Image (cartoon, rainbow, N blue to C red):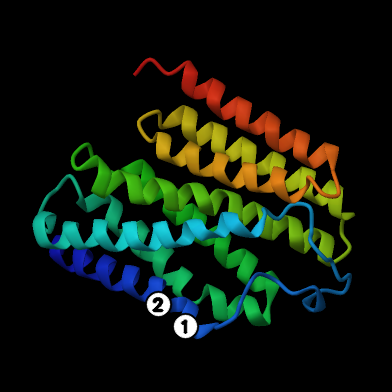
Amino acid sequence: MMRLWAILCVAAALAFTASPLLAPGFNGFEASQFPVPLENPPVQPAGYAFAIWGLIYAWLIVGTGFGLLRRADDVDWAPMRAPLFVSLAVGTAWLPVAQVSPLVSTVMIWVMLGAALLSLFRVGDTDRWLQQAPVAIYAGWLTAASCVALGVVLGGYGWLPPTPAALLSLSLALVISLVVQYRLHRAPEYGITVIWALVGVIVANSQPFNAAVAGLALLGIFAILGLRGTDTE
C-alpha cells in the first residue's frame, strides 16, 4: 500500500501541474461571474505573486518523484501521502470548475487546504527539502488562496463591501497561518509563503492606496516574523 500511495501522489502531482491546460487563459475569477462585479478586489494579491505556482508545481513533482523512486516503502513518508493525494486530486479539477462556479470552486479550495495542512502535519523527519518543503509552500499558498477566494466571493455576491470582505478574509488567513506556524515550528517555508502572498496584497493595494487592507497585511507579516523569531526549536 505504501508504494501504491507513492505512485498515486506522483500521478496526482503530474495531473495537478497539467491542470492549467484544462482552463487556458484563466487568470482568476472574472467580474462578470458575480452579481456585484468587482474589478481588482482588494483581497487579491498583485498578479506577479501567482508566479509562485511554477515553483510549487516543480517542487511537488520533484518531491513526490523522489518519494516514489527512493522512499516508496519508507514508513517516515507514508502518513503524509494520502491527504496530499486528496488535495492534489481535488486541485486537478479546480481550474475548470472555477471558470463555471466561484462558489463551488471556493468550497473545493478549502478542501484542498484542509487536506494539504493534514499532510503537512504528517510529514516525517527525513528528507526535509523533498518531503516537507514542497508540502509546506503548497499549504502556505493555499492558506492565502482559499481566503482570497472567500473574500472575492463575499464581495462579489454583495454579502460584504469589498474592503470589509478583504479584512475579514485576511484576518482568517492570519489566524490560520499563525496557529499552523505556532504548532509546526519545523516548517518555516509555510510562513514564508504566506508572507509572499501578503506582500502581494500590499502591492495590489498601493495604488490606489487602501490603508486598512495594506495595514492588516503588513501587521500579518510582522506577526509571522515575530512568531518565527521566538522559535527556539
Left or right: where 3 falls relative to 232: left
- Figure check: 88 above or below 46: below
Q: Position of residue 122 (x, y in %)?
A: 32, 44
CB atoms of marks 2 and 1 within 8 Å = yes
- The residue lying toward the viewer, choosing from 53 and 72, is 53
Q: Quadrant of residue 104?
A: bottom right
Left or right: where 112 falls relative to 166: left
Q: Quadrant of residue 132?
A: top left
Q: Amino acid at mark 2?
A: Ala
Quadrant where the N terminus is found in the figure: bottom left
Real-space CA distance between mark 2 and mark 1, rounded to the nearest whole angstrom: 6 Å
Q: Position of residue 102 (x, y in %)?
A: 69, 72
Q: Which mark is residue 21?
A: 1
- The residue lying toward the viewer, choosing from 82 and 52, is 52
Q: Amino acid at mark 1?
A: Leu
- Figure check: 202 above or below 100: above
The residue under the point 78% across, 49% down is 166
Left or right: where 86 falls relative to 199: left
Q: Position of residue 189 (x, y in %)?
A: 41, 39
Q: Which mark is residue 147?
A: none
- The residue lying toward the viewer, choosing from 24 and 37, is 24
The residue under the point 61% across, 65% down is 107
